[in-house]
Image (spheres, rainbow, N blue to C red):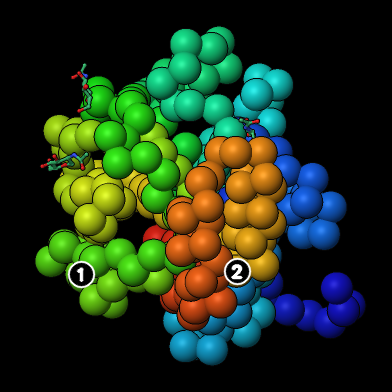
Amino acid sequence: MAATITHAKAPIRVALLVCGTPIPAVAVPYGEYPAIFNNLLQDGLKELKERRTVGPETELVMEGFDVREDIYPERLSDYDGVLITGSASNAYDDLPWINKLVDYVAKFPKDNEAPKLVGICFGHQIIGRAFNANVSKSTRGWELGWTLTDFTEEGKKFWKEDSMRIQELHQDVVHDVPAGFTLLASTAHTTNQSMISKDGRIVTLQGHPEFTGPIMKEFIKVRTANGTFNKDLSEASLKVNDNTLDRATVAARIVDFVRKA
Ligand SMILES: *[C@@H]1O[C@H](CO)[C@@H](O)[C@H](O)[C@H]1NC(C)=O
Ligand SMILES: *[C@@H]1O[C@H](CO)[C@@H](O)[C@H](O)[C@H]1NC(C)=O
Ligand SMILES: CC(=O)N[C@H]1CO[C@H](CO)[C@@H](O)[C@@H]1O
């Protein structure tokens, strides 16, 4: 910080509830989820600065909390947003840390001072479960890699685009839209790709805006080698792996959603 007189605005503060650790082929070159999500959110902030939605001095500070180790933010009012990551675990597993997270989301404060809540993949499914949606394995198997996701009319209003190109890496789905939520996006594989709570405080995404093409390629390679993905699925997803993603647009919308205007 320069020792000049500034009218520093408080930074945008995000608590990341870390629910998993990426495979070593991803974690070694790209970092664990705190680093990967920090990159995403900083790209979103950069986009908002380019659009002059926020001033050039605006900062974003992200802190990670490993909820698998029962570590949660001490004071929620310290944060503008709380973001729940992906995981190799299943959102419907009956494990103490997962049950606690579901309970935490169900009781998440909703007053105007409370942070906004964002769920990505496993986080989307945890939010579905917390609000009594049926979360279980898709009958269609894996949805994998670069995917064009269509927005609903409500989704076009929220995301301010007609569609979203995003990475997918899941076989579990939220089977219905829970009461109090509105569907924002769908694909042929998974109807419930994104939702918003009717009070406008919770937003979810089934896809992974934090995964770039090179990150996704590592997941595909490792899980094809160990038999999780069959050859056809693997080849189909590698073929579209270098396609353009709407990473900055999605990241900017997430940052804009959580920040206090
Ligand atoms: C959840 O959805 C799956 C797939 O459609 C179905 O098999 C299962 O019975 C449903 N569970 C509940 C509790 O509705
Ligand atoms: C394949 O690798 C992934 C990532 O390491 C792991 O989550 C999954 O359980 C493995 N599956 C098998 C069948 O070994
Ligand atoms: C698997 C799936 O996509 N299920 C449902 C998602 O939500 C819509 C709207 O409630 C249902 O019609 C789908 O069947």
Whether label 1 lies within 8 Å of ligand 3 gets the answer: no
Mark 1 vs 2: CB contact within 8 A: no
Determine which quarter of the picture holds residue 148.
bottom left
Quadrant in the picture for the N terminus? bottom right
137 or 160: nearer the viewer: 137
Residue named by callout 1: 157
Question: Image quarter for residue 163?
Answer: bottom left
For the C terminus, the image quarter is bottom left
**On the picture, is 83 further left or further right than 185?**
right
* N-term-proximal mark, 1 vs 2: 1
- Residue picked out by circle 2: 213
- Please provide percent x and percent y for residue 201: 32, 47
At label 2, counting other C-alpha atoms closer than 10 Å, the crowd grade (few under 14, some 14-19, many 20 or more) is some
Q: Nearer the viewer, residue 140 or 104?
A: 140
Q: Amino acid at mark 1?
A: Lys
- Is disc 2 placed on a helix, strand or loop? helix
Q: Position of residue 68 (x, y in %)?
A: 65, 24
Vertical relation: 217 (above or below) 108: below
How packed mark 1 is, by other alpha carbons closer than 10 Å (few <14, some 14-19, many 20 or more), is: few
Whether residue 42 is visible here, answered yes or no, is: yes
The residue depicted at 19 percent of the width and 35 percent of the height is: 176
Tally of marks: 2
Of circles 1 and 2, which is in front? 2
Image position of 179 (left or right of 255): left
